[in-house]
Amino acid sequence: MSQTIILGAGIVGISTTYYLSKHQTPSSIHLVEVSPELFASASGFAGGFLARNWFSPAVAELGALSFDEHKKLAEKENGAEKWGYAPSTSISLSSLTKPGKGVDVWCRDGNSRADAASCDPAVGAAPLWLRRVQGDAVKVISDEGTVAQVDPLQLSQFLLQKCLDSGVHLHQPAEAISIRTDVCNEVSSIRIADTQSSTETDIPCTKIILTAGAWSPEVFKKLFPNTGFKLPIASLAGHSLVVKSPRWTKQDEEKGCHAVFMTSEPGYSPEIFSRIGGHIYIAGVNSATEPLPGLATDAKHNISKPSILRLRDTAREMLGQDDAEDDFEVVREGLCFRPVTNSGLPIVDRIPDACLGVSTRPGAEGGVYLAAGHGPWGISQSLGTGKVLAEMVQGRELSVDISGLALKA
């Protein structure tokens, strides 16, 4: 039996695997991840903020579908307990007059994601764990039921376990090193190298799905060296902190989570998310010039002390108390690399054979597919992307229109 190969076991790859396994024999699906530690980049270190209607027209249907899929999955599988799924309220502390529509490249330009909010700001109250600064104005920028919060690492781990329990094969740490073609010059197998044992295995396949995030261009180049085409995906580094505050307790969680967006200074727009489980996530220091490490697990060696200190200053300003400067506890320092495109829109499409240098079987019998470039919205758009990409690969009717997310070859 021909197998389906997914290259990249981050949140998008796991989501795609999850939906694929519902409509084909799970044992025919192989998930390949090169990193020795799973979810070592954005899938484990992102903020976990979900939005339903903060997107520009090209991605609006996908965003709404994904938000609804997150809610359905959480209701079905007790997501509140297993991965901290919770409704949230978004507030802005910046001088926002009227939100923009679909600011897809917000983080690369240092702007606030609050500019993409879909509703008119309304005067609101700040959560009790947030320290108020004299003169700031709290504005609610989300309608009820349109934003939510998850712990992305726990969600990724849950989805992976569901896939493995169904019979999906995981190769990790392993690397796809080459493809082979048949007498018709069509993709017929892929060679996988186990990076621990140095053994190599050829897996028959006619369908390859590339979901390696910011590393997708490198994987593509290795597998298809005879084409001059380059995937238009770059990386955006982002530092983060996870902290605990004595003012965000289990009793406070019952009042709901909050997503706080602020503009501290030009080019720096911190985001602060309260999560189920007593944690508060802080991010906003981004860089498009930070070199992409060879492996996601290598990012921990590149954490910038000045970037972390900047986030600590923000934590002290927004969570500290006058009589206890550092009464919050830093649980984790992080650095991840998010895949971005020049348009700010993800790419979810079948890669044309002309870009591969080889042929693939027509229709649902074959193909090389790509899902990457989600930028700051990878967690939010993950389930919708996985669902639609699985439909595309299997030749089923697509749940939503993603024609605006096609690869421009």
Image (cartoon, rainbow, N blue to C red):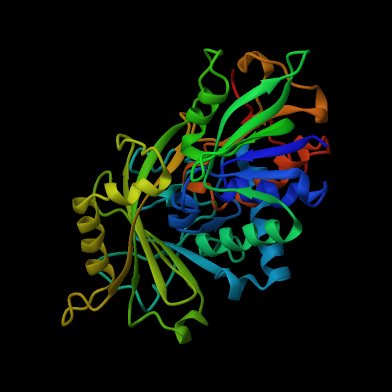
Q: Quadrant of residue 30?
A: top right
Nearest the eye: 147 or 72: 72
The total number of labels drawn is 0
Q: Is residue 240 something that shows in the picture?
A: yes
In the picture shown, does residue 227 fall above or below 293? above
| Residue at (25% x, 45% y) in the render | 266
Provide residue 212's location: percent of width, then percent of height: 53, 39
In the picture shown, does residue 131 fall above or below 179? below
Nearest the eye: 26 or 70: 26
Provide residue 241's location: percent of width, then percent of height: 33, 61
| Residue at (49% x, 72% y) in the render | 257
In this image, 29 relative to 342: left or right? right
In this image, 48 relative to 125: left or right? right
Provide residue 292's location: percent of width, then percent of height: 36, 37
In this image, 28 relative to 281: left or right? right
Looking at the rendered image, the quarter that the N terminus falls into is: top right
Q: Is residue 269 something that shows in the picture?
A: no
Nearest the eye: 300 or 244: 300
Looking at the rendered image, the quarter that the C terminus falls into is: top right
In the picture shown, does residue 183 fall above or below 78? above
In this image, 231 relative to 348: left or right? left
Nearest the eye: 119 or 393: 393
Provide residue 368's location: percent of width, then percent of height: 67, 28
| Residue at (53% x, 41% y) in the render | 374
